[in-house]
Amino acid sequence: MTGSDFVLIKKFLNSQRLMTLATYSQKPWVATVYYVTDKDLNLYFVSSPNSKHCQDIEKNKHVACAIYDSHTPNSELKVGIQLQGEAGLVKGWDKTKVLLKMWHKAAPGAEDVVNIKNMKNKIVTPRVYKIKPTMIKFFNQRLYKEKEEKVFKLV
């Protein structure tokens, strides 16, 4: 991946908030989650370990995600990301606190409920999960006119 591709992908990921997450244990499942990304393109979301998608991740770390701007009219050029990766629970309160702060900034509104204090005291169940991309397909009709997309292997 070139530096300019990395910057464009990072910029797009930072411009969006919702991600469709596909998991699989015995059957496929999808969930929509708010996410945030770090400097290495890892994605983080907050969800309950009791949810179907998080229970699937416990059994099978391989996931797929799709991120698109849902406000794009059908007649306009499309930009989006499809990716494959490995997901898992973030361990450690210090790391969780930093990521939770990032997540609250990107998806405000739950700070008074979903916080470290309530997590530690088991008042709420949500935890932070990380997705490390292994492949990113950057679908960009504006940038890649004829081909429309580029695929990047990150393993």
Image: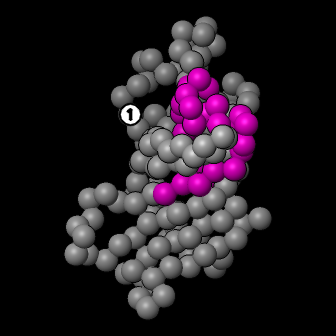
Q: Position of residue 56 (x, y in %)?
A: 65, 37
Q: Is residue 94 left or right of residue 115?
A: right
Q: Is residue 78 left or right of residue 139?
A: left
Residue at the spot 54% in from the left edge and 43% down from the top edge: 29
Quarter of the N terminus within the rendering: bottom right
Q: Position of residue 125 (x, y in %)?
A: 57, 18
Query: Vertical placement of 153 versus 130: above or below?
Result: below
Residue at the spot 70% in from the left edge and 61% down from the top edge: 134
Residue 129 in magenta? Answer: no
In the current view of this chain or complex, which residue is farthest to the right? 155
The quarter of the picture where residue 51 lies is top right
Query: Vertical placement of 11 versus 149: above or below?
Result: above
Quarter of the C terminus within the rendering: bottom right
**In the rendered image, is residue 90 in sight?**
no
Which residue is nearer to you in this view: 36 or 47? Answer: 47
Which residue is nearer to you in this view: 56 or 45? Answer: 56
Query: Vertical placement of 74 versus 56: above or below?
Result: below
Q: Identity of the amino acid at label 1?
A: Pro
The quarter of the picture where residue 96 lies is top right
Q: Position of residue 101 (x, y in %)?
A: 52, 33
